[in-house]
Each structure stands twice: as structure tokens, then as C-alpha cells.
Image (cartoon, rainbow, N blue to C red):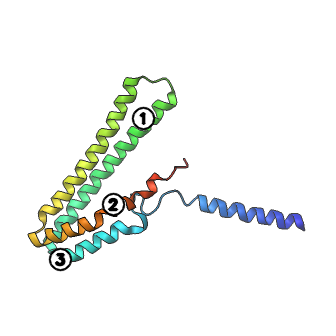
Amino acid sequence: MKNLVLSLFAAIFLASTISILSQGYGYGNNFGDRDGLRERNRDRIHEKLNLTENQESQIEALRINHQKQMIDFRADLEKKQLEMQELKNNGNYSREEYISLTKEISKVKSEMHLASANHQMDVYDLLDSSQKEIWNQFSKRNHKFEGRYRKHRKMPRFD
């Protein structure tokens, strides 16, 4: 009887551990958006800006194009990171190979940041002066929380 209770307890513990571990490491929608905060903030700023239908449709088109561009950048970045991992796994690599690949990774990251800045300015250019004022107030207020969205990326990985 004691063995049965012990084995039942071990099975329950094992099943719950597997269940917890199978939920994955990340949070939110896998794009650094923990608990949907970025989505809620976007909805909130759209309400405050009182956008016209034309502005909304233009911004939505810009957003979709930007997301497509970011998907391509993330894919390129991931490929470069895998190349780096492969290079390191091979063990015998030169300084030139390592530095070259590091520069390629940095270039993709830089292009991502530049594309994000261009997207933000494209949206900003669609706004009228009163909307730009609201946008700037919102940006200033939310700037102090910027690191909150990326906090989980500083945690150790368990790959």
C-alpha cells in the first residue's frame, strides 16, 4: 500500500513538472509583449488621438508592412545567430570569420532599429499638429517604462 501511494505521488509530481515545463520560457506573444501591455497601449493611444478613418487605414497599412519587414529581419537575424552557433560548435574558426559574422549580426540589428524608427516617423507624419502633441506626451510618459517590455530577456535561458 505504501509503495502504491508513493508511486502515485511520484506520477502526479512528474506529470505536473512536465506540464509546467512544456508551457515554454517566453511570455506574452513571443515578441517581447508581456501580458499584452504593448497592445493595450497602442489601443489607448489610438483612442486619444481621435484618428480619422483615412488615418486609421493608412496607419494599419503601414503597421502591416512594418510587421512583414520585421518578420524578414527576425528570420535573417536568427539565421545569422545559427551560423554563429554553428561556427562556435565547429571549434576551429578564425578571427576573421568570427568578426565578420558578428558584423553581419550587428548590421541586421541596426537595420531593424532603423526600420522601426522610420515606421514611427511614417506614422508621426500622418498626424496633424494636435495629434502630434498628444503623441509626444504619450511617448514621454511611456518612455520610462520602455525596459519593462524587455525585462524577461535578461533572464537566463534554459536551451
Select label 3 or label 1 by which is in front.
3
Query: Vertically, is 27 above or below 102?
Result: below
Q: Secondary structure at mark 3?
A: loop
Is 15 on the left or on the right of 54, as rendered? Answer: right
The residue that mark 3 highlights is: 50
**Residue 45 sits in which quadrant?**
bottom left
Whether the residues at callouts 2 and 1 have beta carbons within 8 Å, the answer is no
Q: In the image, what residue occupies the spot 85% across and 66% down?
A: 4
**Residue 103 sits in which quadrant?**
top left
For the N terminus, give its image quadrant: bottom right
Q: Which mark sits nearer the N-terminus, 2 or 3?
A: 3
Give how far apart the Cα atoms at labels 3 and 1 are. 46 Å
> Which three-letter amino acid code belongs to the residue tagged 1?
Glu
The residue that mark 1 highlights is: 83
Q: Secondary structure at mark 1?
A: helix
Q: In the image, what residue occupies the spot 35% across and 48% down?
A: 74
